[in-house]
Structure formats: C-alpha cells, structure tokens
Image (cartoon, rainbow, N blue to C red):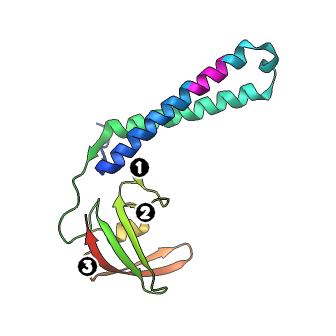
Amino acid sequence: MAREIKLTKAGYERLKQELQEEKQRLDEATRVLQEQMESYEDYEDSGLEESKREKARIEARVDSLEDILQRAVIIESAEGDKIALGSIVLLKDEKTKENLTIQIVAPAEATILEDPMRVSDESPLGAALLGKKEGDKVRIETPSGKRRYAVLSVGA
C-alpha cells in the first residue's frame, strides 16, 4: 500500500488548485507542440525540442500532484498544547530576538513564500518542534550555524 501523505485541509485545497492550473498549462503546451509539429519550418527549430521538454515537465508535475492527492489524508487542526502536524507556532529567535510564525506541515505543502511560513515536519526545525509546548526551547543545526528558539505560543 502506498504511504499516506498527511495534509492540512488548506494545503489539500491549494494542491487541488495547483493541479487544475497545471492541467490547463498542459493543455496549452500540448496545443503549442501540435502546432509546431504541423509546421515543417518549426520542426527543425530548437523550439520544438524545448516545447517537448516543457510538456514533459508539466506532465511530471501533474502526475506528482495526482499521486499526492490520491494518497492524501486530511488532518484535523492540531489541538492541545503540544506542537503537532498542523500547529501554528510563534517562535522567538534567541539570538536576533525576532519573532517568527510558522505552521508545521507535511513536506508536500511546505513553503517559505507564505505567511505563516509552512515548515515541513521532516525539516530540522519542524522535527525539533514536534511534541514541544509553550515555554520550551529548541536548538537546531542550520547551514549557517546553531540556532535557538523559544516557543512563545502554540495554536491551530
């Protein structure tokens, strides 16, 4: 049996939306490739090979998203005072004194581009935080050195 992938409801919905967008891109890439193949002039052009590669990349992403969504198990919001998958955590960097809000998620929905930043439970920070609670401190190794964080709050 394929390994299940735990996702938050919001993460599941985001991936479903991304799948729809990728399918639209795939339709467009297929149309462009067919037009290029019908034109003899373009057939000798390197644009045809690039179009084939782009279509293959999109197909691979569609396959990956479909696989993730088929194996997805939607987790309920994290409850309780311990950090778990789905928890939103307010941290304080003990060196810089800056606050950082993150959500602990599965690798499939991790991203640093959103607020709160979604951190994988398999990343060094995510793994170190699992099971911790408000007031706890964690220390992790990063490429730039050791970092220490204090857990200020845990929410859902």
Q: Which residue is the site of mark 1?
A: 108
Mark earlier in primary sequence (2, 1): 1
Is 84 situated left or right of 56 in this image?
left
Mark 3 packing: few (<14 Cα in 10 Å), some, or many (20+)? some
Q: Is residue 149 magenta?
A: no
Question: Viewer-proximal residue, 124 or 7?
Answer: 7
Question: Viewer-proximal residue, 38 or 106?
Answer: 38
- Residue shown at 39% from the left, 70% from the top: 101
Q: Which residue is the site of mark 2?
A: 115
The picture quadrant where one finds residue 72 is top left
Which residue type carries mark 3?
A: Glu
| Residue 23 drawn at (x, y percent) | 49, 30
- Give the foreground label among 3 and 2: 2
- For the stretch drawn in magenta, the main secondary structure is helix
Mark 1 packing: few (<14 Cα in 10 Å), some, or many (20+)? some
Whether pointer 1 and pointer 3 mark residues with C-beta atoms closer than 8 Å, the reply is: no
| Residue 30 drawn at (x, y percent) | 59, 22
Question: Viewer-proximal residue, 115 or 102?
Answer: 115
- Residue shown at 45% from the left, 59% from the top: 114
Which residue type carries mark 2?
A: Asp
Is 12 situated left or right of 59 in this image?
left
- Which of the image's four quarters has the C terminus? bottom left
| Vertical comparison of 114 with 148: above or below | above
Q: Tag 2, which secondary structure? A: loop
- Residue shown at 35% from the left, 63% from the top: 103
Q: Tag 3, which secondary structure? A: loop
